[in-house]
């Protein structure tokens, strides 16, 4: 019998040059940036449940689906370019520029009176926020040991889940106490405060000499054609789509579902949305940390993380029980339980599909492709949900489709995530990288 191995990835990254305390502080700032980004992309979901907002733009159910989807069109389009940008120029400067752009665009929604202007601003926010995930995962990949990456990703994912968790109740409260216009203006401008710690605390992750030489313009160490010929890469795209179809349904349509079908007030909706997203955040962090501890003790990193991912998809399938629930209390229970259970998948899936099986030299590019799949779920989930709601008059059909995608995702994890199918960096490519960094 083979001895358990603690190896968790094809190639081990160099030890981070950052002091340990600064490494964790920077991770916290990245998590906070993600929180603000997800807040700004989902606060419109609360507005779409408000009659005044719908009347202002004369929106039908299908229109609401298209507006929720607009963000993801540009978000998907800019994923791969942003992956190249952070691979070549580092994380700090591109992230700061994009962050300022999306905060200003989000605040500007409160000043918009035309539907076309609303859509344009959502497209701008989507393009700017495309930097968040490739930049964050490149930074984690470069600065954390593989055996602690589950915890690191879990902490980062707190931001992505607490963004919509805080976003729904805060947006609802601001709308109730002021109006939807001021909600966008206040939250957009407040987000700009994040730039202060980012600019003054975070170190540039690209060596100055390497940046000046122009060698950072070298092509990717693995051609795009070779990356896309890997069955594992395509498997990660399917898994990311299936996972995010459910989460983006929750981010875009959950507020309307709770208000329109389950009869909650706007404030009650905010509260239960908070519990659902807080649940997935806490479970994601706990599951990532637990997997790290099990891997440190027993090895078998891929097997352990796959088990967590499949278990998360299985727990999330209880969304169908919520859709079929006859009482409000039962529906709310499964609403929270299904999304929270998906947290078993969250950190471990991201570590497995991005940090464990993918060479570090192409982390940004591969994460860009994976986020195209994720963004495609963001494009389709709101549109398909709106269309099915329009046709059926109920949320049962949209939530049944979520169940189908969860089954497909779990099956793909079991059959396709095989390390021998991962893309490989050639010795020649490694030589080129070393030469570039030494000049």
Image: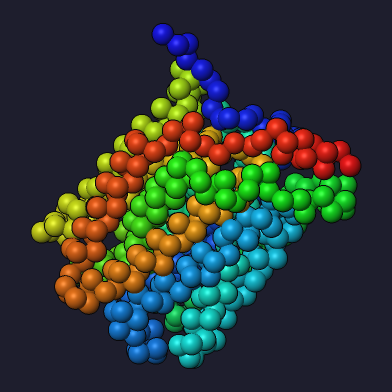
Identify the residue at image location x=70%, y=32%: 427
Identify the residue at image location x=40%, y=61%: 377
In the image, 369: left or right of 248?
right
Q: Residue furthest left?
A: 326
In the rendered view, tell whether residue 432 sits above or below residue 104.
above
Colouring style: rainbow
Q: In the rendering, at what x and y percent does residue 254 appear? A: 31, 64
In the rendered view, tell whether residue 3 sits above or below residue 158.
above
Residue closer to the observer: 277 or 305: 305
- Count numbered badges in the picture: 0
Quadrant location of the C terminus in the rendered image: top right
Q: Residue furthest top?
A: 1
The reply to whether residue 81 is visible in this rendering is: yes
Quadrant location of the N terminus in the rendered image: top left
Residue closer to the observer: 383 or 129: 383
Identify the residue at image location x=36%, y=31%: 307
Identify the residue at image location x=38%, y=77%: 66
Residue closer to the observer: 102 or 255: 102
Residue closer to the observer: 263 or 95: 95
Q: In the rendering, at what x and y percent does residue 283 appear? A: 39, 41
The reply to whether residue 168 is visible in this rendering is: no
Q: In the rendering, at what x and y percent does residue 304 appear? A: 41, 28
Q: In the rendering, at what x and y percent does residue 290 appear? A: 44, 29
């Amino acid at each position: 019998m083979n001895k358990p191995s603690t190896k968790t990835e094809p190639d081990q990254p160099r030890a981070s040059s950052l002091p340990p305390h600064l490494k964790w502080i920077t991770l916290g700032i990245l998590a906070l940036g993600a929180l603000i980004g997800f807040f700004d992309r989902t606060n419109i979901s609360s507005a779409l449940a408000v009659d005044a907002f719908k009347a202002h733009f004369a929106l039908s159910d299908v229109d609401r689906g298209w507006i929720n989807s607009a963000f993801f069109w540009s978000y998907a389009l800019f994923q791969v370019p942003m992956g190249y940008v952070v691979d070549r120029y580092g994380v700090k400067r591109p992230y700061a520029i994009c962050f300022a752009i999306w905060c200003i665009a989000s605040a500007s929604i409160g000043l918009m009176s035309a539907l076309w202007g609303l859509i344009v601003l959502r497209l701008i926010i989507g393009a700017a926020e495309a930097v968040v995930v490739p930049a964050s995962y490149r930074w984690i990949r470069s600065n954390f040991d593989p055996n602690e990456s589950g915890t690191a990703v879990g902490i980062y994912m707190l931001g992505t889940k607490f963004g919509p968790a805080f976003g729904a109740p805060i947006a609802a409260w601001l709308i109730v106490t002021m109006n939807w216009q001021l909600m966008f203006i206040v939250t957009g401008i407040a987000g700009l405060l994040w730039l202060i710690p980012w600019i003054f605390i975070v170190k540039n992750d690209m060596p100055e000499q390497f940046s000046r030489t122009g060698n950072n313009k070298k092509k990717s160490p693995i051609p795009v054609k070779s990356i896309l010929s890997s069955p594992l890469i395509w498997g990660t795209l399917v898994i990311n789509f299936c996972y995010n179809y459910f989460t983006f349904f929750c981010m875009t349509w959950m507020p309307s579902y709770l208000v329109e079908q389950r009869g909650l007030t706007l404030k009650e909706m905010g509260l239960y949305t908070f519990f659902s997203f807080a649940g997935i955040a806490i479970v994601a962090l706990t599951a990532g940390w637990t997997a790290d501890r099990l891997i440190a003790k027993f090895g078998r990193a891929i097997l352990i993380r796959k088990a967590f991912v499949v278990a998360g998809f299985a727990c999330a399938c209880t969304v169908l029980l919520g859709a079929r629930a006859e009482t409000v209390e039962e529906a709310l229970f499964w609403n929270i339980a299904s999304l929270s259970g998906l947290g078993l998948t969250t950190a471990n899936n991201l570590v497995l599909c991005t940090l464990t099986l993918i060479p570090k030299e192409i982390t940004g590019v591969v994460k860009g492709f994976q986020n195209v799949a994720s963004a495609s779920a963001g494009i389709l989930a709101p549109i398909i949900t709106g269309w099915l709601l329009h046709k059926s008059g109920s949320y049962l059909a949209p939530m049944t489709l979520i169940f189908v995608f969860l089954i497909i995702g779990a099956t793909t994890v079991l059959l396709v995530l095989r390390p021998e199918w991962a893309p490989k960096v050639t010795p020649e490519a490694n030589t080129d990288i070393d030469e570039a960094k030494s000049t």
